[in-house]
Image (spheres, rainbow, N blue to C red):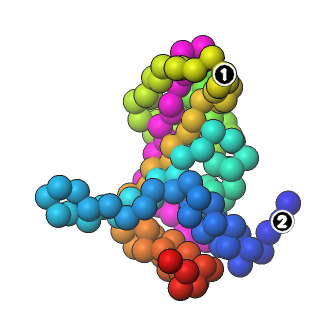
């Protein structure tokens, strides 16, 4: 699917509103301008990365990945799979977080959950600006 830059910006902003980390201030009063996007659907993560890479353009080496791994999944296989989907080298994957499945009714994703982390103040603010333009003065 070919999206125009405008369409990709709108879609990327919408995805970030739904699945992205919000502005944070830590207990020391320091601002954190980190872009974090978490999802278990590879299509969603790939689309958000396309937005970052084509609409910002990001510093590729600053894009990091982290996996949330459920007990019945193989961490090495997940890293291999997600690295292929995202084109993020395995060397830029942070330590995985291993989760405990608590409910027999809930079946976790076979892909685990992927978090994209990108530290860049100007790009974080640019995403916030795009969100503001897309969603206007709501809330």
Residue occupying image coordinates x 66% and y 22%: 105
Q: Residues within 10 Å of mark 1 (few under 14, many from 20)?
A: few
Q: Residues within 10 Å of mark 2 (few under 14, many from 20)?
A: few
Q: Are the residues tagged 2 and 1 within 8 Å (C-beta)?
A: no
Judging by the rendered image, the residue that carries numbered circle 1 is 105
Q: CA distance from mark 2 to mark 1?
A: 38 Å
Q: Residue 55 is drawn in which quadrant? A: bottom right
- Give the image location of residue 61, x and y in percent: 45, 52
Q: Secondary structure at mark 2?
A: loop
Relative vertical location of residue 70 with respect to residue 125 in this rendering, above or below: above
Foreground pick, 132 / 137: 137
Q: Is residue 74 visible?
A: no
Spot the residue most to the top: 72
Does 18 lie within the magenta span? no
- Give the image location of residue 79, x and y in percent: 57, 28
- Give the image location of residue 17, x and y in percent: 56, 64
Residue occupying image coordinates x 66% and y 29%: 109
Q: Secondary structure at mark 1?
A: loop
Q: Residue 13 is drawn in which quadrant? A: bottom right
Relative vertical location of residue 95 with respect to residue 21 in this rendering, above or below: above
Lateral position of residue 73 relative to residue 2, left or right: left
The stretch in magenta equals 55-73
Judging by the rendered image, the residue that carries numbered circle 2 is 2
């Amino acid at each position: 699917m070919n999206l125009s830059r405008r369409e990709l910006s709108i879609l990327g902003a919408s995805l970030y509103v739904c699945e992205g980390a919000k502005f944070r201030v830590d207990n020391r009063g320091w601002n954190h301008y980190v872009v974090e996007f978490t999802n278990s659907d590879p299509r969603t993560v790939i689309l958000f990365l396309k937005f970052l890479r084509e609409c910002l353009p990001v510093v590729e080496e600053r894009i990091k990945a982290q996996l949330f791994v459920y007990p019945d999944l193989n961490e090495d296989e997940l890293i291999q799979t997600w690295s292929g989907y995202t084109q993020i080298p395995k060397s830029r994957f942070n330590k995985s977080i291993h989760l405990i499945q608590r409910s027999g009714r809930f079946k976790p994703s076979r892909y685990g959950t992927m978090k994209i982390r990108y530290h860049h103040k100007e790009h974080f603010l640019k995403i916030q600006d795009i969100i503001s333009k897309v969603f206007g003065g709501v809330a």
